[in-house]
Image (cartoon, helix red, strand yellow):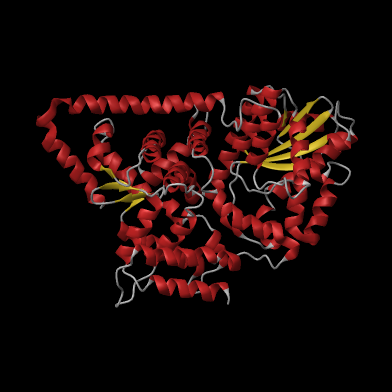
């Protein structure tokens, strides 16, 4: 039986039960940690998908309340769909099919500290003194909240959902901690942006699902896609706020600024963000002691030698190796993460990874032709394409296998005699921080780490789906004190700044409410204002 037919049967099953009963059981499931069961065995991505379908669909007129057992049976059927959603029949692209299957699970396995660092890194890139004002101005125009205020409030709500074991956080618990340090109208506006009540969530699911598939059947890509609930990670309830899952809260809150600015002006934002992203990468290389030649300096070399052509953003040379680094301040389109189609991968990566490979290859050839000082021999040249978020592509050899024979030839031609294909690697900025911190601590070269990755990728038993796994194994091999390093000193400093700003607001709020009973009417009025969102 086909995937779409099985899916429709499951959706019809959901419609047999009242929406409220199914939603309640699903939320209980998402918030319950069963003894001896890991977060992975709880399969939260499957529960999120069923919750989205439940919110989207209208129950039958004869619908009855669901029991926990009813919901559990449907969840198991959704879980069993993965075999048909994954195209394992395509033997030429087995890794590409397996990639979509595993990445859904990796999203809920990443340590939430990575989401926290993502939030602070974004603040660091956008809000330093010389950063473009456009980030602040555009965000204020879209949300009516100052960008820095949003980051500080996100640190607060990120923390309470990360630390709290309660399914619901009452308004009376968190409101006096924030107000009047922040005006209650500002807190309400913040929650209206990142949160939704159930009626709003239902409308959001109906709208987004229609945008994805129109009146057509559910496609396999939807099965593997990230939860749409990330768009509104906080649930606005009568008694307080909640989230469908702590990971939905931490991912949704940490990425809200990025998603908002990209939606408002994708090209304008990307141009400005890329420049700031490159400057941050330069800082990371320098802070860990890896000297780099920047794009502007390479262009001077081109000019002095009367040559023209593509250059990379950074060139690192040490101990007989040359590493060509190209910064791409981009994030993966969902299509790139869930597809098992080579042509889609090729089209979506044309202006990012594939362009970066060509830039690295051409730059290596140009510098070689003019006898550039200390340029490494062919076998000791490397390319590293660094993106803002991970595309989970492995190295050049694995990407070439994803693309199929036709486009693989173009990659081979771009790097032939310039950089070995196995020496081309991809990572996100968080992983670059980890790689450089680890190499700095263990006194090894970037090339040593990349050689280690290439060797691991040659054997199926040791191949990985994300660079972070290579970092952890490399750290263990060298007995490093840092098993999975992430971040930089400036991120730690800026996290301290954000928490300090939050602490000042909370202190002001605490002192205000110390007057006791005389403030009760005012406090109840503030709660009433927030509850207008319900």
Q: Measuring 47% from the left and 26% from the top, which residue is drawn there?
A: 494
Report the side of 375 relative to 131 (left or right).
right
Work out whether residue 364 can be spotted.
yes
Q: Quarter of the image holding residue 473?
A: top right
Position above or below: 398 against 147:
below
| Residue at 30 percent of width and 63 percent of height | 20
Residue 150 makes an appearance in the image: no
The image shows residue 466 at horizontal and vertical percentages of 64, 45
Please indicate whether residue 320 sits to the left or right of residue 391 in the image.
Answer: right
The residue under the point 78% across, 49% down is 397
What residue is at 13 percent from the left and 32 percent from the top?
519
Residue 376, given in percent of the width and then of the height, sits at: 86, 31
Between residue 46 and residue 252, name the one nearer to us.
Answer: 46
Q: Nearer the viewer, residue 136 or 242?
A: 242
Q: Image height check: is 6 above or below 361?
A: below
Q: Quadrant of the N terminus?
A: bottom right
Residue 471 pos. (x, y %): 66, 36
Q: Please tell me in which quadrant of the rendered image residue 307 appears.
A: top right
x and y, in percent, of residue 356 in the image: 72, 44
């Amino acid at each position: 039986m086909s995937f779409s037919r099985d899916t429709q049967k499951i959706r019809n099953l959901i419609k047999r039960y009242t929406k409220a009963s199914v939603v309640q059981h699903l939320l209980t499931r998402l918030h319950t940690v069963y003894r001896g069961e890991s977060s992975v065995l709880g399969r939260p991505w499957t529960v999120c998908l069923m919750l989205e379908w439940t919110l989207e669909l209208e129950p039958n007129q004869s619908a009855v309340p669901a029991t926990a057992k009813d919901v559990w049976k449907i969840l198991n059927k959704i879980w069993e769909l993965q075999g048909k959603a994954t195209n394992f029949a395509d033997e030429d692209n087995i890794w590409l099919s397996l990639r979509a299957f595993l990445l859904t699970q990796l999203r809920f396995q990443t340590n939430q500290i990575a989401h926290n660092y993502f939030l602070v890194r974004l603040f660091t890139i956008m809000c330093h003194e010389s950063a473009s004002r456009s980030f602040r101005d555009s965000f204020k125009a879209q949300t009516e909240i100052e960008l820095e205020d949003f980051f500080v409030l996100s640190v607060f709500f990120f923390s309470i959902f990360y630390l709290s074991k309660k399914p619901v956080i009452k308004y009376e618990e968190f409101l006096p901690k924030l107000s009047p340090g922040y005006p209650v109208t500002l807190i309400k506006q913040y929650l209206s942006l990142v949160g939704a009540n159930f009626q709003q969530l239902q409308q959001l699911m109906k709208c987004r699902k229609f945008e994805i598939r129109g009146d057509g059947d559910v496609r396999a890509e939807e099965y593997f896609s990230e939860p749409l609930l990330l768009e509104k990670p906080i649930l606005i309830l009568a008694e307080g706020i909640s989230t469908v899952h702590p990971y939905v809260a931490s991912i949704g809150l940490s990425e809200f600024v990025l998603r908002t600015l990209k939606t408002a002006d994708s090209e304008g934002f990307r141009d400005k963000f890329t420049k700031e992203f490159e400057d941050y990468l330069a800082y990371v290389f320098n802070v860990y002691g890896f000297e780099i030649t920047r794009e502007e300096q390479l262009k001077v070399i081109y000019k002095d030698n009367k040559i023209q052509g593509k250059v990379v953003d950074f060139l690192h040379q040490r101990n007989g190796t040359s590493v060509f680094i190209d910064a791409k301040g981009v994030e993966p389109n969902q299509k790139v993460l869930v597809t098992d189609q080579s042509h889609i991968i090729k089209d979506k990566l044309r202006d990012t990874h594939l362009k970066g490979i060509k830039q690295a290859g051409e730059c290596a050839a140009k510098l070689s032709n003019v006898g550039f000082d200390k340029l490494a021999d062919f076998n000791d040249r490397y390319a590293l394409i660094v993106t803002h978020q991970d595309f989970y592509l492995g190295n050049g050899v694995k990407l070439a296998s994803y693309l199929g024979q036709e486009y693989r030839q173009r990659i081979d031609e771009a790097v032939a005699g310039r950089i070995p294909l196995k020496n081309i690697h991809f990572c996100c900025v968080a992983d670059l921080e980890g790689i450089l911190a680890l190499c700095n601590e263990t006194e090894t070269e970037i090339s040593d780490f990349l050689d280690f990755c290439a060797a691991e990728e040659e054997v199926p038993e040791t191949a990985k789906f994300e660079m972070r796994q290579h970092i952890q194994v490399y750290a263990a091999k060298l007995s490093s004190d840092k098993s999975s390093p992430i971040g930089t000193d400036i991120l730690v400093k800026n996290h301290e700044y954000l928490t300090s700003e939050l602490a000042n607001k909370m202190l002001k709020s605490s002192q205000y409410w110390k007057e006791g009973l005389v403030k009760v009417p005012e406090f109840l009025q503030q709660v009433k204002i927030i509850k207008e969102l319900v």
